[in-house]
Structure formats: C-alpha cells, structure tokens
Amino acid sequence: MNKIIVILTLCVSLILAGCQGAGAGRTSSRNVDPALTKSNTAKFFSKSAWQSCAVGAGLGGIGCMLAGGKTGVCLASAAVGCGVLMGANYYLDSKRAQYADDQMRLDAYIQDIQQNTYEVQAVTQTAKAVLDKNLATLNVLNNQIKNDTLNKKQAQTDLAQIDANIAYLTDKLRRMKKVENEWVSISSQEQQSGMRVTKLDHQISQLHKQISVLENQINLVTKQRSAVKVS
C-alpha cells in the first residue's frame, strides 16, 4: 500500500511540475511568424515539450518502481531527461544520484548548461531574423503614417503579427530566465555542500549574457511597436 501511495505521489508531482505556469504567458500561435513556430528551435523552452517530458518522466519513474527499483533512485532518474526545467531540486537529486563524485557532477552540470546556452543562441538567431523584419515593417508603417499613405487594414494585419511575435518570444524569454534561476539555485546549493562552483558560475554568466541578447532584441522591437498608433 505504501508503495502504491508513493507511485501515485510521484506521478502527480511530476505531471504537475510539467504543468507549472501553464496558465501564464499564453500566446496564440495563430498570428506568430511561421519562422518562429516551425523552425528547429521552436521546441526549445516550449511549454508543450516540457509538459510531454514531465509526463514521460512520471511514467518512467512509475515503471521503474513497479519493476522493483528503489524509490529514491527512481525519483531521481525520472527527472534526468527533462533537465533543469524539472526544477532545481529534482534535477539536483538526479545528478547526485548519478554522480557521487563532485567533479563528475560538476562536469555534468557544465555540459547541461552549455546545452541550454546553445539552445538560447539558436532561439536568438531565429528571433533576430524575424524581429529585424518586424523593425523594417514598423519603419515602413511610420513613414506611411507621416505621409498619410497608410493602408489601415494591412497595417492592422502587420501589427497583429508583430504583437504575436513579441508575445511568443516574451514567453520564451520568461522560460529562459526560469532556467537561469534554477542554475543559480543549483550552484548555491552545491556551494553550500562544499563544491567549488567557480566554473559553473562562469557558465551561468555566459547563459545570462546570451539571454540578455534576446531580451534586448525584444525590448527594441517592443519600443518601436509602441510608437506606432493606428486608429
């Protein structure tokens, strides 16, 4: 009976973890530029991809326990595939279960955070192409407004897509910042346990810089967008 309770708790906790924030930052993909939603980078920091991973992790953990695995090991291993988005504590437990040696665990952290940084770079590169196009559109609209040659219907269509792009990327940015915060938490907890985290903190700084590049791009387009008024 106790094992069944633990299994159900594991399932619920992992699936709920995957659903965290599901009601926040919702963006409609209807108007988003297809270059953002259909690119190879679309899955990075995606709510749906994360939820699928969390559900899969929960089922994997349940299968492990039903097969006779130890509860702690199953709980830790279930979180491995989802990375730091599972949450700092889940992720930390999984890595400590995998690697008792501090150096091996640190190397694993660095490999994973470098992957996260690469993913941010990939999203940023795709976003830059789209946002540069949006800036060009906003400049055209501004000139049309000044020259009183604006086609309002077309302008509203263009602005709707720009607004959708901004919302979509802002949601991505929020998830990236959550990842960064989880890494900061992991570094803090490992430092308290005695690990030397200088190299990890350096990688966190690199992740932060890359996230800031995307944030600056979004802020620039947002500022230009707010200046365009179509009545």
Image (tube, rainbow, N blue to C red):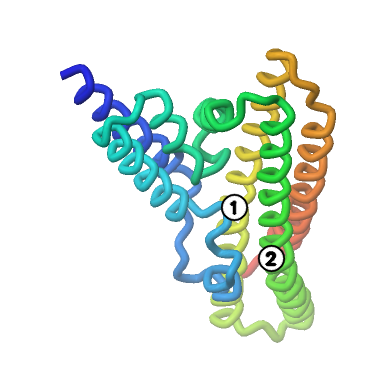
Q: Position of residue 66 (x, y in %)?
A: 24, 34
Question: Which residue occupies the foreground of this view, 29 or 208?
Answer: 208
Identify the residue at image location x=67%, y=61%.
123
Question: Looking at the image, is 206 positioned above or below residue 17?
Answer: below
Q: Position of residue 135 (x, y in %)?
A: 75, 71
Q: Position of residue 161 (x, y in %)?
A: 57, 71
Crowding at dot 2, Cα within 10 Å, few <14 / some 14-19 / many 20+, comes out as many
Question: Looking at the image, is 105 positioned above or below residue 154?
Answer: above
Amino acid of disc 2: Ala
Q: Callout 1: helix, strand or loop?
A: helix
The reply to whether residue 185 is in sight is no
Task: Please state, as top left, top right, bottom left or bottom right, where the N terminus lies in the image.
Answer: top left
Identify the residue at image location x=46%, y=49%.
50
Question: Which residue occupies the foreground of this view, 195 or 209?
Answer: 195
Spatial CA distance of label 1 from label 2 is 11 Å
Give me the disc on residue 172: 1
**What residue did someone put label 2 on?**
127
Question: Which residue occupies the foreground of this view, 79 or 174?
Answer: 79
Task: Please state, as top left, top right, bottom left or bottom right, where the C terminus lies in the image.
Answer: bottom right
The reply to whether residue 141 is in sight is yes
Whichever of callouts 1 and 2 sits on the residue coming sooner in the sequence is: 2
Q: Callout 2: helix, strand or loop?
A: helix
The reply to whether callout 1 and callout 2 are in contact (CB within 8 Å) is: yes
Image side of residue 50 versus residue 113, left or right: left
